[in-house]
Image: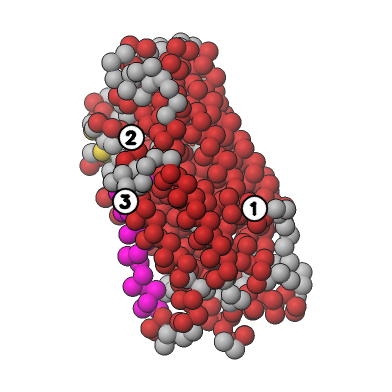
Amino acid sequence: MSQASQIRRDVGPFALMLTGLGSIIGSGWLFGAWRAAQIAGPGAIWAWVIGAAIIMTVALTYAELGAMFPESGGMVRYGHYSHGSLVGFIAAWANWIAIVSVISVEAEASAQYMSSWKWQWAKDLYHQMPGGHGELSTNGLLIAAALVVMYFLFNFWSVKLFARSNTAITLFKLVIPALTAVLLIASGFHAENFAVGIHGELHETDFPSILTAVAIAGIVFSFNGFQSPVNLAGEARNPGKSIPFAIVCSIGLATVVYVLLQVAFIGSVPREMLADVGWHGINFSSPFADLAIILGMQWLATLLFIDAVVSPSGTGMTYTATTARMLYGMERNGTLPSILGRVHPKWGIPRPAMWVNLGVSFLFLFFFRGWGSLAAVISVATIISYLTGPVSVMTLRRTAPELNRPLRLAGLSVLAGIAFIMSTELLYWAKWPLTGEIILLMVVALPVYFYYQAKSGWHDFGRQMKGAWWLVFYLPTLALVSWAGSTTFGGKGYLPYGWDLVVVAGIGLVFYQWGVKSGWRTPSVEAAQLEARLDPNAPLVPPDEETAERITGH
């Protein structure tokens, strides 16, 4: 029996949707409204709407891919199928970095919320700093590390156990944020707060600040949970229907909740706190719990303190499951040690991959000690990870038109183009130098790829490079434009605001078209077609790279 077949398909559509919703509604709801208001003031409401619309276009392209190739860790495989091993490696690395770091940030969120408890030992868990970038103390980090271990243990035995526990946790997570929003709107709501600007001036819509909030305030980070149903596609029953259902419903429900929470947050902050410093100066360690205490709703604050453990923990457990499947998928691409592809014969879990992710999670805890700083890093890495999906799905429409597609989106060429261009804009909105720093982080893993290429005797390396030149040039081009762009987005001002957005959109369009044309019919796709002929009713899961090359002879 192949390792692919050992993965159990036990997760139904509703449980898969709750997995996505549970990933989306994590620590983002606890902190995102506060950070977005700091950056964009009342315009933060529009930031959530814009963010949801962009993520939906990206997610739908992955929905077709996930239904087409229902395999565990699929998000790290699609670029490999459409463009070869180098594009596959860069896309997989970006995606894995963006997801594995979430395990740490969710644990940090829970520890940070504890710092508003009444006891002194709790207050000492977190140290406030200007701009919302405070840090956990040593004891706070130890609590976060213990939570990471808990996430790990919850996933160590069975995906069915994980799915069942996640259903209960997600339902709780959905009720508490909605209840919080309604209660805050009903108690002490100040409509005049919507007239206060970012720095205390009269509010006027600041479009650049809204766009920056979309990119780095935790909005992209929050919605990134749509990937969980895709990465768990190998465990899903009837993926052609369950994956799009899970993605669309989870994003739609989460958007309603997040917009309500943003309205509630803006209207609930006491006016005197805004009088001198505006939204930029509002600095909470536990935003909604702090507001509940200010408004005299101690019982709600207590409930929020409980949810501050439950919500992030549900997301942390979900991401612990999905990141293990990602390393499993990367090993099948032929660019990681074979041990990471081993699945436990009884429990159907890639346990060695889980151990690696546990170690990496501890590293993120050590280097990024506060929710705000780590959420910004995750957001930009997430944006980079989105780039290959729209390109891959259109490339496979061209290079593998005969493969079965349980979900075939109408107007995909337009949708995918919009998704890529808007992802490019998101990357630019994140501001220099953060954009450049995270792009550099994507490059540092390339020695691992070249090691495995050398190990294989540089087999077919020329064709791998030909399929990857568009992405190789895309990343430094975006870094250069971000550096030279308008001062509004942290650049040197060589491009004036307004024109910089037009230039970035044009770059996105050019590289999207180049990327689609660069794809080729890879051995993985050839092998998938051959296996589909032998068993047309079997799930379309291409074999690992070594097997694919052996089957196809190249």
What amino acid is labelled 1 in the image?
Val
Residue 311 lies, in percent from the top left, at: 48, 37
**Circle nearer the viewer, 1 or 2:** 1
**Along the line of sight, the residue nearer the viewer: 116 or 441:** 441
| Residue plotted at (59% across, 79% down) | 523
51 displayed left or right of 242:
left
Q: What amino acid does circle 2 point to?
A: Gln
For residue 192, what is the image quadrant?
A: top left
Badge 3: few (under 14), some or many (20 or more) residues near its Cα, within 10 Å?
Answer: many
Q: Which residues are magenta?
A: 430-452
Judge depth for marks 3 and 2 and give the one in front. Answer: 3
Task: Mark yes or no: residue 399 visible.
Answer: yes
Q: Is residue 362 left or right of residue 542?
A: left
- Mark 1 — residue? 414
Q: Nearer the viewer, residue 296 or 428?
A: 428
Q: Is residue 496 above or below residue 283?
A: below
Badge 3 or badge 2: first in the primary sequence: 2
At 22% from the left edge and 42% from the top edge, which residue is drawn?
138
Q: Amino acid at mark 3?
A: Trp
Q: Is residue 291 visible?
A: no
